[in-house]
Amino acid sequence: MDPDTRIGGPQNRFPETRGSILLQLNATDCEIRSRAWDTIASVYWKPLYAYQRFRWKLSNEDAKDLIQGFFQHVVEKDCLTAYDESQASFRTFLRLCFDRYSANEWKSAQRIKRGGAVRMETLDDAVPAAADVEALFHREWIRNVFALSVAELKHQASEAQFEVFSRYDLSDPNLRPTYSQLSEALGLPATTITNHLAAMRRRLRQIVLQKLRELTATDREYRNEARAVLGIEVE
């Protein structure tokens, strides 16, 4: 790959003011790079965990060890500099990197096993269809983006605002109270319930979009991910 097309290359395509985590991975400041890796790990750990448990049928501990090893590998080998936004979204690129890493780890384990040094279970032969595992990864990634965004929303909102939001928007749809029931339970006017919900939904959308902007390399990828996650068109 032409080095000028890489993230952080001499002719970087991505403006430094954009705030992309992918750009921060190449920062000269170690603290900035560390925060960027922490963000990527927080967003992708759970989706990768669910993905490889479903695909490779690994145990809980083996799954955790594999993911931990993968993140150490991409940091040490600086694998993410090969990302090309024109070929795939970053989340797809990261998943493919994880697939290659997992396959190499499995091959290494098989060589050790044949040598008699270590006994290790092989990957399950009944690997689900590619479309199924891709859909699972996509679904778990969206779920985790929203979970992290809701956690940030809770930190930013007032206790009353988040209580209303939690009881209504985060509740089981089959058990969701009406506005009148929520008003009575919390001792708040119905108009306040309406206003709190509108404010929380608006702020949650802003947080989700902010996270997507941080997690994408270009404006085009950002727009694609906003469409995939929120079903909206953004500028």
Image (spheres, rainbow, N blue to C red):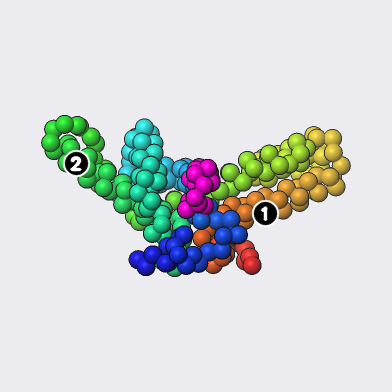
Contact between marks 1 and 2 (CB within 8 A): the answer is no
Q: Is residue 31 magenta?
A: yes
Mark 2 sits on what residue?
Answer: 110
Task: Tell me the amino acid under the disc marked 1.
Answer: Gln
Residue 72 screen position, x and y as percent: 38, 42
Instruction: Please tell me which residue is depicted at 62% across the width and 54% down the height of the picture.
Output: 210
Residue 20 screen position, x and y as percent: 55, 56
Mark 1 sits on what residue?
Answer: 206
Q: Is residue 190 left or right of residue 100?
A: right
Q: Quadrant of the N terminus?
A: bottom left
What main secondary structure does the magenta stretch of the protein show?
A: helix
Q: Is residue 119 left or right of residue 59?
A: left
Instruction: Please tell me which residue is depicted at 68% across the width and 39% down the height of the picture.
Output: 155
Residue 126 screen position, x and y as percent: 28, 47
Q: Quadrant of the C terminus?
A: bottom right
Q: Quadrant of residue 173?
A: top right
Q: Is residue 6 left or right of residue 144?
A: left
Q: Is residue 199 magenta?
A: no
Q: Give the mark, 1 or 2, whose residue is nearer the N terminus.
A: 2
Numbered range of the magenta stretch = 24-38
Q: Is residue 166 visible?
A: no
Residue 211 screen position, x and y as percent: 59, 52
